[in-house]
Image (cartoon, rainbow, N blue to C red):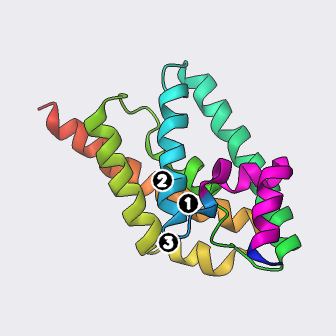
Amino acid sequence: MSEAAIFTKVWQKPAYFIAFGFGTGLMPFAPGTWGTLIGVVLYALIAPLPQAFYFLLLLIFFGLGVYVSTHISQELGIDDYKGIVWDEVVGFCVTMTMVPCHSIWLIIGFILFRLFDVCKPWPISFIDQHIKSGLGIMLDDVLAGVCASLILHSLIWISSL
């Protein structure tokens, strides 16, 4: 499918619109970073919610991501197409789970998540290489979010001493 056809589908089909991070996946450079910025906005919107509701939304966002990523990957014939960035959106929200909504933690969380997402240390690389389709697309970023979150929570704890 041509880039022009993908561009058109993003603005016409809800599954593409979501998978492409509300259009940020169309950016010509660093679409994952732009998608993560959508994650920052989404986090700022859902952070004030009770934690149980936050976790429920993460599960819904994850399931939605598996669905749209699988569908679009199959339609494009490309596993983990670079423009599919909903996984970054959800991965960043995982990073920020139970983190105070403060600019310093947002910035550090953003940097940590992008580092884990781009570098893909083990076990993230294992998931990225061995689990395909929408589940694999989503899982490696969720695991990157968990790893980033562990470090972020450690930094928050250290800063409170």
In space, the residues marked 2 and 1 are separated at their CA atoms by: 6 Å
Q: Is residue 41 in the magenta section? A: no
Tell me residue 37's x, y (percent).
Answer: 48, 48
Residue at the spot of label 2: 145
| Circle 1 crowding by C-alpha within 10 Å: few under 14, some 14–19, many from 20 | many
What is the C-alpha distance between the residues marked 2 and 3? 12 Å
Quarter of the C terminus within the rendering = top left
Badge 1 amino acid: Asp
Per the model, the C-alpha gap separating discs 1 and 3 is 11 Å
What residue sits right under mark 3 in the picture? 123
Mark 1, secondary structure of its residue = helix
Residue interval drawn in magenta:
4-24
- Residue at 47% over, 30% down: 44
Amino acid, disc 2: Gly
Vertical comparison of 2 with 37: above or below:
below
Q: Which residue is mark 1?
A: 141
